[in-house]
């Protein structure tokens, strides 16, 4: 069992930054950890993910819409996943969710939400123009 708790959301102006955290409890040594977002009236959208095997994290992948502005990282000791959001735009406004697929030996993560078996409760990000 893995439990995920997100934090760090808030309201910022366009161009600002936020850092979201996802604290994980349980075994994520061989997992995929991902970030998704969902705006009102829209489908849940993949933001990015990072595979973890044997406790070692590999290169993160990002959606085109956030590549170069968002960065995924992980603190192994704290079992915490981060999403750094820079150069925020109003269209980044959404509820942001942390997700995990654990255990997995897949060399690459999936960008489909149904592939993930654990989810956090979400944290709201609001970007004003």
Image (tube, grey):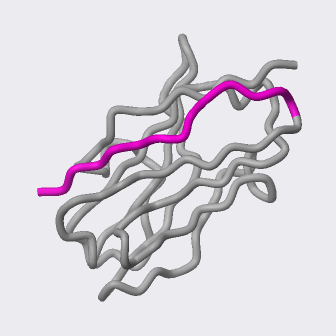
Residue in the foreground of this view, choosing between 35 and 84: 84
Q: Residue at x 83, y 27 (%)?
A: 13
Percent position of residue 92, x then y: 71, 31
* Up-down relation of residue 119 to residue 26 (above or below): above
Is 13 magenta? The answer is yes
Q: In the figure, is residue 127 to the left or right of 27?
A: right
Residue in the foreground of this view, choosing between 53 and 9: 9
Q: Quadrant of the C terminus?
A: top right
Residue 52, by quadrant, is bottom left
Residue 103, by quadrant, is bottom left
Q: Residue at x 80, y 59 (%)?
A: 68
In terms of secondary structure, what is the magenta stretch mainly?
Answer: strand
Percent position of residue 81, x then y: 45, 61
Q: In the figure, is residue 126 to the left or right of 20?
A: right
* Up-down relation of residue 127 to residue 37 (above or below): above
Range of magenta residues: 1-14
* Up-down relation of residue 33 to residue 35 (above or below): below
Q: Residue at x 40, y 61 (%)?
A: 33
């Amino acid at each position: 069992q893995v439990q995920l708790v997100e934090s760090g959301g808030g309201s910022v102006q366009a161009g600002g930054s936020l850092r979201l955290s996802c604290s994980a409890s349980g075994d994520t040594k061989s997992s995929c950890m991902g970030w998704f977002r969902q705006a009102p009236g829209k489908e849940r959208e993949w933001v990015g993910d990072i595979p973890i095997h044997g406790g070692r994290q590999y290169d993160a992948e990002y959606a085109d819409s956030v590549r170069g502005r968002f960065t995924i990282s992980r603190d192994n000791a704290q079992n915490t996943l981060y999403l750094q959001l820079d150069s925020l735009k109003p269209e980044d406004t959404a509820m942001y969710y942390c997700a995990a697929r654990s255990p997995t030996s897949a060399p690459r993560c999936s960008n489909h939400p149904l592939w993930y078996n654990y989810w956090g409760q979400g944290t709201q990000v609001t970007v004003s123009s």
